[in-house]
Amino acid sequence: MYEANRMEVIRQFSYESERNYTLDMVLSINGIPMVALELKNQLTGQTVDDAKNQYIKNRNPREKCFQSNKRFLVYFSVDLYEAWMTTRLAKEKTYFLPFNQGSNGAGNVGGNGNPLTEMTDEQIKATIKAFGEATRRAYEAGFDGVEIHGVNHYLIQQFFSNYSNHRTDNWGGSFDKRMNFPLAVVEEVKQVVQHFENNFIVGYRISPEEIHGTTIGYDYKESAELVKKLERYGLDYIHISNFGKFDMGPEGLDTSYVELYKKAIGKETPLITVSNVFTQADVENVLALADIVAIGRAALLDPESTHKLTHQRKDEIVSEMSEDVMAYVKWPQGLYDWYRDGAALPQVPNLESLL
């Protein structure tokens, strides 16, 4: 009987269509929503307390899906270090209990009051294999390619960073060893892809530097060396993640990261860059440096921006937020909440006037 059950994970679960309100994640069984999760991340300036506040202040207990014993059985508030849960939403009377597990040896995530421990060598190798498995699933699901996410302080960047990687084995301890994990992930993905019948794109996204005040995780020289080694695997592109502006560069240099990376990888591997690209003039300026331009916030402002750019309609492109634009694009409530609550996200022009 249990084998016949179908469990699904749903991101940005919409529960109020008129105002486009969403939950970060929902677990359902046989199409019935059972578990709600609000997910927060200290790296974006939010914690488990922000998740709790969303349930208390922004989730109406009278909504059908939130009514006690009607739909959801449990509500989780989660960040990188803590998990709290409640079984009933009641505005300010909502009562959360900790849902943390303690550590039990190497490789386990530390729970409440317990120190974090290193991944074991076995766990690292299993994780590398999991990247290959995820690639296979993406191919079978009909995707055209994958982008290996070596940015935003997540796992791949953590291994490469001297700030977060304090290992002394084959996966850390020196610059060369800090490169081993990202290189192993790319090698695994490429080995999986070579067995596909159809062409499948594999790219790699990288933050050019990681600097915490006077503490350096890695600088542009080290990331350029990593990119050189990555290029040997025949990647379809390298994607530079610029947080400030597409033409930014290392402090004290007049050269952009794009130009530095172009010299590092040569002409064979296309280079993508991003950040603060809202107009046709921005696109043209990017393409004077890189091979491909990526946009994110421009699409949040105007979902038709790329179509307008390629069909001589540049004067119609929306480049700043307004009440009319917000009514048209209908952002998920979770995204709006993140900006409203002051999360450390890239800015959208004129959005502050609506918050």
Image (tube, rainbow, N blue to C red):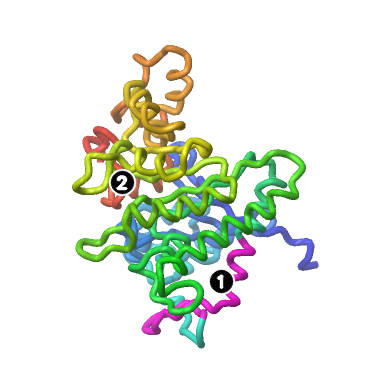
Nearest to N terminus: mark 2 or mark 1:
1
**Which residue is rendered at x = 55% and y = 65% of the image?**
73
- On-image quarter of the C terminus: top left
Residue 122: in magenta span: yes
Residue that label 1 marks: 124
92 lies above or below 146: below
**Residue 218 visible in the shown view:** yes
Kind of residue at disc 2: Tyr
Residue 262 falls left or right of residue 3: left
Residue 294 falls left or right of residue 236: left
Percent of width and height locating residue 302: 40, 27
128 lies above or below 260: below
Report the disc number at residue 339.
Answer: 2
Query: Magenta span covers which residues?
Result: 107-130
Name the element at disc 1.
helix
User: Is 38 or 71 nearer to us in this picture?
Assistant: 38
Kind of residue at disc 1: Ile
38 lies above or below 281: below
User: Is 225 or 181 nearer to us in this picture?
Assistant: 225
Classify 10 Å Cα crowding around label 1: few (below 14), some (14-19), many (20 and above). Answer: some
Percent of width and height locating residue 89: 42, 62
